[in-house]
Image: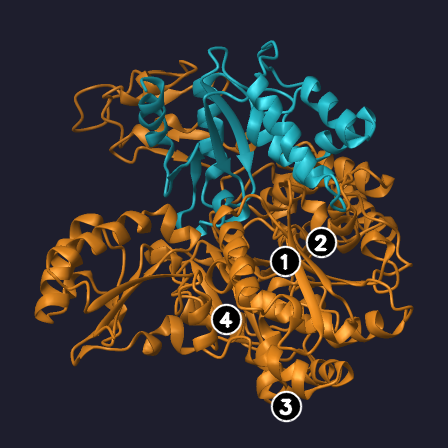
Chain colours: A orange, B cyan
C-alpha cells in the first residue's frame, strides 16, 4: 500500500510538453528521499486540460499542479511529499481560493462536465490491465456473456439511444441488429473500430485509446458476441504512436488474462482483435474506404448498397463503430439502458466529448451531456477567448462541418440541432475563432484540405471541390464578382447531391455555413476589396503613421522588398524624418509591423 | 512534381533479409500488403522501385497494384527523406493560431516547398494534419522533437540547432 499517488499525464499533449522527463525526475527524487515504498508515480492518460500541461495530481489530497517543469520536481517532492506542504505557487490558480485549495472537480473546467467515455482517462495507468479491472473493467463483458443473450445485448444498446459518435449519428443498436439478422449463414462476420481520427483539430479518440485502451477492446468483444463475430480489427492512425503502443500492450494483456482469444470466460465464445495502421488518407475514415484499406487496397470508398452490415470487410457482414461510441458500451451494459437514456436530449442521449481548440483559454478535452449549450462550453468550461478578443465563430465537424455564429451560442448541442443550424456534430472537434480570423480564409482552408484528400474516384468531388477552391481563391484575392458568389453556392449543392461518399457530400459545408452566417465578409472581399479580419494578404495594405514614426529605420532594414524609404516630413518632437511604405513594392509580409517598437505601423 | 534528390538505391543484403522475413511472417494474413509496405518503409526509410519489386514477387501481387497503393497514401514515400523531417501541423487548431505563417517562413528560409528536400539532404519539409497536441498550437515536429506555441521569430534559431548538429 502506498500512502500517496502522483498521477502524471502521459497523453500526447503533455508528452509533447515534456511529461516523460518529469516522471523520470520524480522517480529519481522519490528514491533519493527514501519514499519509494510510500509514494507511487502513475503515468495516466489525458486529464483534459491540455493547455496547462504538463499536468500532475497528487492524491489523496487531489492537489493539481499545472505547467510543471523538471526544475520544480525537487521542490514538490521535498515540500509536498516529504513535509506535506503544498507548493501553492505551482498549483492551478483556479483551484486556489481564500479558504485554501479546492478540489479540481469544483473548477469551472470540470464542474459542468460528465465523464463517461473519458471516465478512466487521467485516472488509471492505461498500460496495466489490473487497474482497468479494478475500476469495473471487463465486468460488462462477463455480464453479457454469462447473463444475456446476443439479442438482449442489442436490445439494451437500442433502448439506450446510443448513436454513432463518429459524426453521422446512426443508431448503434440498429447497426448491430442489421449485422446480426441480415445474413445468417454461420460464416465469419467482423467487428471494426474506426480509430482513423482524421479531422484536423480533433483528438478525442486518441485520448481514449491512450488513456483507456481496454474499454475499446471490451466493447468490441461485446459487439462481437452480439452480432456473432469472432474477429475484430482496429484501424488506427499511424500518426498516433502512443495510442498504437498502448493498444498493442492492451491486446497482449487481454490475451494473457483470457479476456481475448478462445473460450472467453469459459462460455465457448471466441474473439480476437488485430491492429491495422492507417497511412495518412483522410478518406479512410469513411466506412467503406476504411474496409477497402484494411483489405490492402487503395482506400477508395465503395457505393452503398450493399451496406457493410450485409457485405463489408472481405465481403462479409461487418459493423464499424467509432472509438468514443465503443467507450460508452460497457457502462450501458452494466448500468442499463435507462441510466444512459436519462442523459441528453430527446433524440441524442448520453454525453459527447469535444476537443476544444483554437482561440480559447482552456484548450483541451471536455465531455458534456448532450444538450449543453455552446456558450457553457466556451465561456465557462473553456474559460473564454484569450487577450480580450471577441468571439466570432465556432467550427464543429471539421472539414465536413460548418461554422456556428454568435447568434446560435445558446442552441442546445445535439445531432439534430447542429444540422439545423448548418453544421454537424462530426467527431467532436470544436475550434473557436475570434475577430482576427477571416471566415472566407477558413472556408478556403477546409476546401484546400478536401481537395488534397479527395480520393479521385468520383468526378463531383475530384473536380468540383477544386473548382470551388479556385473560386474561393478569387474571392480572397479581391477578383470575384457577386455573380461568382451565386455560382459558388450552386456548385456547393451540386457537389453535395452528386458525390459518392460522405467526404464529397459534406465537403461544401464549410463554404455554405460561412456564406449563410458571414455573407457580409464575403461581400466585403468582393465589393469593397477588403478583408475585415486583416488576413487575406492580397487585400491588405500596410501604412506608417507619420506622426508616430521616429525614423529609426528598423522597419526599412527588415523589409525584404526595399519598399520603405524616408519622407521629408519630421513629426513635432521627433529628430528624424518619418518613413513611408511604397504600396507598389510592398509584398505584405508584415515583417515591418512585427519589428516596429512604437506601434507606428498598421495593416488595413 | 516535388524536387527530390536522385539517390541511387543502396539497399544492403541485411535489409533485404529483414524484408523477406517480414513478408514471410505476414504473407498468409488477410490484407497483408499495407502492413508489409509499412514495415518495408521502416527498414529502408522509403519505398524505391527495387523494394517494390521484391514485395511484388514474394507476395505474388502486380507491381501496378503496389504502385497504386504506395501513391495513394501520404505516409508512403517513393523518395528518401532528408536527415531531419520538419513537419508543421496545418490542422485547424494550429492553423487558426498562425501555423500557415510558420510553414511559409520555413519554406522561405530553406528555399523548399512542402514535400521537398534541401539540396544538401539535411531537411525535408512536410505539412501534417493534427498530431493532437492542440494545447500547444501552433506546433511543429523535427524528427521526434516537438516545438509548441511557436512564433515565426523562433524559426531561424530552431533550424540553426539542426544545421550545426
Q: Are marks 3 and 1 on the same chain?
A: yes
Per the model, the C-alpha gap separating discs 4 and 2 is 25 Å
Q: Which residue is mark 3?
A: A338
The chain to which mark 1 is attached is A
The tag earlier along the polypeptide, 3 or 1, is 3
Foreground tag (2 vs 1): 1
Q: Secondary structure at mark 2?
A: helix
Q: Quadrant of the N terminus of chain A?
A: bottom left
Taking A474 as reference, is A189 left or right? right
Q: Secondary structure at mark 3?
A: helix
| Residue furthest out toward the left | A83
The tag earlier along the polypeptide, 3 or 2, is 3
Foreground tag (3 vs 1): 3
Q: Are marks 2 and 1 on the same chain?
A: yes
Q: Which residue is mark 4?
A: A367
Relative to A154, residue B54 above or below: above
Depth check, front residue: A392 or A153 = A153
Residue A434 is situated, as x and y percent measured from the top left of the image, at: 47, 53
Q: Secondary structure at mark 1?
A: loop
| Residue furthest out toward the bottom | A338
Per the model, the C-alpha gap separating discs 3 and 1 is 28 Å
Residue B13 is situated, as x and y percent measured from the top left of the image, at: 58, 17
Q: What residue is shown at x 79% (from left), y 53% (from top)?
A: A288
Amino acid at each position: 500500500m502506498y500512502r500517496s499517488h502522483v498521477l502524471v499525464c502521459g497523453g500526447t499533449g503533455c508528452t509533447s510538453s515534456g511529461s516523460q522527463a518529469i516522471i523520470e525526475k520524480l522517480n529519481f527524487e522519490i528514491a533519493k528521499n527514501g519514499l519509494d515504498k510510500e509514494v507511487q508515480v502513475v503515468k495516466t492518460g489525458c486529464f483534459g486540460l491540455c493547455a496547462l500541461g504538463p499536468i500532475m495530481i497528487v492524491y489523496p489530497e487531489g492537489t493539481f499542479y499545472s505547467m510543471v517543469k523538471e526544475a520544480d520536481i525537487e521542490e514538490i517532492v521535498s515540500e509536498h511529499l516529504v513535509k506535506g506542504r503544498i507548493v501553492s505557487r505551482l498549483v492551478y490558480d483556479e483551484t486556489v481560493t481564500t479558504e485554501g485549495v479546492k478540489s479540481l472537480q469544483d473548477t469551472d473546467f470540470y464542474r459542468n462536465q460528465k465523464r463517461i467515455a473519458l471516465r478512466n482517462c487521467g485516472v488509471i495507468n492505461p498500460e496495466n490491465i489490473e487497474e482497468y479491472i479494478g475500476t469495473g473493467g471487463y465486468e460488462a463483458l462477463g455480464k453479457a456473456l454469462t447473463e444475456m443473450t446476443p439479442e438482449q445485448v442489442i436490445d439494451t444498446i437500442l433502448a439506450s439511444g446510443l448513436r454513432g459518435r463518429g459524426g453521422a449519428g446512426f443508431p448503434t443498436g440498429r447497426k448491430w441488429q442489421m449485422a446480426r439478422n441480415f445474413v445468417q449463414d454461420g460464416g465469419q462476420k467482423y467487428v471494426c473500430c474506426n480509430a482513423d481520427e482524421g479531422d484536423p483539430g480533433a483528438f478525442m479518440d486518441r485520448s481514449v485509446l491512450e488513456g483507456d485502451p481496454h474499454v475499446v477492446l471490451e466493447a468490441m468483444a461485446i459487439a462481437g458476441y452480439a452480432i456473432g463475430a469472432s474477429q475484430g480489427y482496429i484501424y488506427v492512425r499511424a500518426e498516433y504512436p502512443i495510442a498504437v503502443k498502448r493498444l498493442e500492450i492492451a491486446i497482449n494483456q487481454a490475451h494473457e488474462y483470457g479476456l481475448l482469444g478462445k473460450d472467453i470466460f469459459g462460455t465457448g465464445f471466441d474473439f480476437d482483435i488485430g491492429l491495422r495502421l492507417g497511412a495518412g488518407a483522410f478518406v479512410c475514415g469513411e466506412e467503406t474506404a476504411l474496409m477497402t484499406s484494411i483489405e490492402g487496397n487503395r482506400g477508395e470508398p465503395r457505393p452503398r448498397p450493399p451496406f457493410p452490415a450485409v457485405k463489408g470487410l472481405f465481403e462479409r457482414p461487418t459493423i464499424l463503430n467509432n472509438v468514443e461510441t465503443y467507450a460508452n458500451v460497457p457502462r450501458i451494459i452494466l448500468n442499463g439502458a435507462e441510466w444512459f437514456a436519462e442523459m441528453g436530449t430527446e433524440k441524442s442521449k448520453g454525453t459527447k466529448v469535444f476537443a476544444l481548440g483554437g482561440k480559447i483559454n482552456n484548450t483541451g478535452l471536455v465531455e458534456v451531456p448532450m444538450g449543453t449549450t455552446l456558450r457553457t462550453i466556451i465561456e465557462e468550461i473553456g474559460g473564454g477567448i484569450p487577450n480580450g478578443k471577441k468571439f466570432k465563430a465556432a467550427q464543429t465537424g471539421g472539414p465536413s462541418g460548418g461554422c456556428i455564429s454568435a447568434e446560435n451560442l445558446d442552441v442546445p448541442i445535439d445531432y439534430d440541432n447542429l444540422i439545423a443550424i448548418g453544421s454537424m456534430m462530426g467527431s467532436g472537434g470544436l475550434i473557436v475563432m475570434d475577430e482576427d480570423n477571416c471566415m472566407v480564409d477558413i472556408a478556403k482552408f477546409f476546401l484546400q484540405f478536401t481537395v488534397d484528400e479527395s480520393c479521385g474516384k468520383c468526378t463531383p468531388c475530384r473536380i468540383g471541390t477544386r473548382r470551388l477552391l479556385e473560386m474561393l481563391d478569387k474571392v480572397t484575392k479581391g477578383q470575384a464578382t457577386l455573380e461568382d458568389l451565386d455560382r459558388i453556392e450552386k456548385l456547393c449543392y451540386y457537389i453535395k447531391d452528386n458525390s459518392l461518399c460522405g467526404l464529397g457530400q459534406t465537403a461544401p459545408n464549410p463554404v455554405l455555413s460561412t456564406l449563410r452566417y458571414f455573407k457580409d465578409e464575403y461581400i466585403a472581399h468582393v465589393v469593397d476589396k477588403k478583408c475585415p479580419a486583416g488576413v487575406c494578404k492580397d487585400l491588405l495594405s500596410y501604412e506608417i503613421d507619420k506622426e508616430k514614426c521616429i525614423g529609426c529605420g528598423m522597419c526599412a532594414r527588415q523589409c525584404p522588398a526595399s519598399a520603405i524609404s524616408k519622407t521629408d516630413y519630421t513629426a513635432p518632437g521627433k529628430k528624424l524624418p518619418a518613413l513611408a511604405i511604397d504600396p507598389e513594392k510592398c509584398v505584405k509580409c508584415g515583417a515591418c509591423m512585427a519589428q516596429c517598437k512604437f506601434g507606428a505601423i498598421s495593416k488595413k | 512534381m516535388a524536387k527530390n534528390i536522385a539517390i541511387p538505391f543502396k539497399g544492403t543484403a541485411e535489409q533485404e533479409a529483414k524484408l523477406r522475413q517480414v513478408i514471410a511472417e505476414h504473407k498468409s494474413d488477410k490484407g497483408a500488403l499495407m502492413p508489409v509496405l509499412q514495415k518495408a518503409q521502416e527498414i529502408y526509410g522509403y519505398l524505391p522501385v527495387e523494394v517494390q519489386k521484391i514485395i511484388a514477387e514474394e507476395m505474388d501481387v502486380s507491381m501496378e497494384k503496389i504502385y497504386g497503393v504506395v501513391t495513394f497514401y501520404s505516409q508512403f514515400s517513393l523518395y528518401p527523406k532528408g536527415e531531419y523531417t520538419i513537419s508543421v501541423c496545418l490542422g485547424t487548431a494550429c492553423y487558426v493560431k498562425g501555423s500557415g505563417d510558420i510553414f511559409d517562413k520555413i519554406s522561405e528560409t530553406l528555399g523548399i516547398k512542402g514535400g521537398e528536400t534541401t539540396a544538401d539532404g539535411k531537411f525535408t519539409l512536410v505539412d501534417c494534419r493534427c498530431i493532437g497536441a492542440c494545447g500547444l498550437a501552433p506546433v511543429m515536429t523535427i524528427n521526434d522533437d516537438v516545438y509548441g506555441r511557436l512564433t515565426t521569430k523562433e524559426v531561424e534559431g530552431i533550424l540553426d540547432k539542426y544545421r550545426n548538429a
